[in-house]
Amino acid sequence: MNDRLKALADAGVSIWLDDLSRERIESGNLAELVTQSNVVGVTTNPSIFASALSKGEKYEPQVKELKAAGADVDTTVFELTTTDVQNGCDIMMPVFEASGGVDGRVSIEVDPGAARDSDRTVDLANKLWERVARPNLLIKIPATEECLPAITATIAEGISVNVTLIFSLERYRKVMDAYITGLEKADAAGRDLSTIHSVASFFVSRVDTEVDRRLPEDSPLRGTAALANARLAYEAYEDVFGSDRFKALETKGANAQRPLWASTGVKDPNLPDTLYVTELVVANTVNTMPEKTLQAVADHGEIIGDRVHGTYEESRDAIAALEREGIAYDEVVRILEDEGLDKFEVSWKELLETVSTELDKA
């Protein structure tokens, strides 16, 4: 067991891998990461599946079977991706059981084309939940304004959710409200609240990417926005889940919706490659990392305890300093949400095209 990763886990950070493929599953690599690198969860998205299927001979036998059965492209994508997630869930099941359902989770995202359609998102979430049929599944729903009701509806039905593509503090509070409202509805329906789990994926590195491109190369503000934003998100988390409203549900077994630090691979070579891991260490959080970042943390990440408490005023000052430079916070987070949805839709299209090509060859 790697000492640096163990220190991160001991500080209360659940280490999740931001990647999944049939090769990783069948080679034993995922199971190895669980035993040797403290990996206790997995996240996926359309980009990850597009990459896996574009270079994965492991998918060929199932593609041939599906083609023989007359499956179209959409059905084939659904079956390929849910099979991987099922198998990933099975590998993570011992972690799920040992952690009382907190970790050992695998996430799968609804079709990003439904990101502005709450009813369709709920329908897709139900289909994925029923198809994968594993208690340690998380359904990823984007945190668009339009999909807030979908978060409430799926939670109310007892479906565990990973709310993704969160950039703004205001939207994050709405996400937490949607989750708690869902719990209240689940409680009214007589559901066991202890079985419902959720994480809120707050995106980190892309904030610096968008902000820093507007700053001079020598600006001391470069590399400050993302950490400030994430740390203020944790302050909001403490506020909401420390409220009387949530505590009333907690007495009935409800689980807090943990913050998940997403997009934690550092894109600027001038910044430390472990920045969005070591500087966001705080209890009751998840950090989902691409393997390159996981390896960097294992190799040289300096874990020196809680890096969030005590930083809230400093973080507010950092956002205010950017505003004084003419960088409007609200504009930045709006652009990032739109770009994030666009990227996932492009990846989804690539995924469909890749599968279409494989079906033609099968």
Image (cartoon, grey):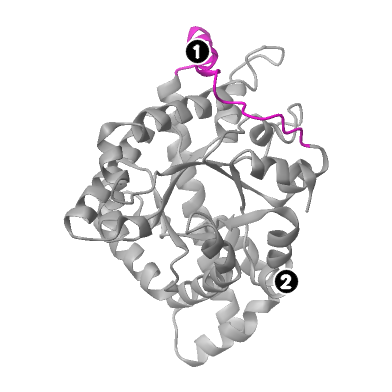
Q: Residue at x 56, y 34 (%)?
A: 204
Identify the amino acid type marked 1. Glu
Residue nearest the viewer, comparing 222 with 34: 34
Residue 288 magenta-highlighted:
no
Q: Residue furthest bottom?
A: 68
Q: Residue furthest right?
A: 299
* Mark 1 lies on residue: 313
Residue nearest the viewer, comparing 59 with 177: 177
* Mark 2 lies on residue: 28
Figure check: 288 above or below 270: below
Under circle 1, the secondary element is helix
Expressed as whole percent of the image width and height from the top left, the position of residue 245 reads 25, 36
Quadrant location of residue 306?
A: top right
Q: Residue furthest top?
A: 324
Under circle 2, the secondary element is loop
- The numbered dot on residue 335 is none
Q: CA distance from mark 2 to mark 1?
A: 45 Å
Instruction: Left or right? Give the position of 231 relative to 176.
Output: right
Stretch in magenta = 301-328
Instruction: Left or right? Give the position of 165 relative to 301.
Output: left
Q: Is residue 282 visible?
A: yes
- Looking at the rendered image, the quarter that the N terminus falls into is bottom right
- Looking at the rendered image, the quarter that the C terminus falls into is bottom right
Identify the amino acid type marked 2. Gly
Label 1: how many Cα within 10 Å (few below 14, some 14–19, many 20+): few
Expressed as whole percent of the image width and height from the top left, the position of residue 263 reads 58, 41
Label 2: how many Cα within 10 Å (few below 14, some 14–19, many 20+): few
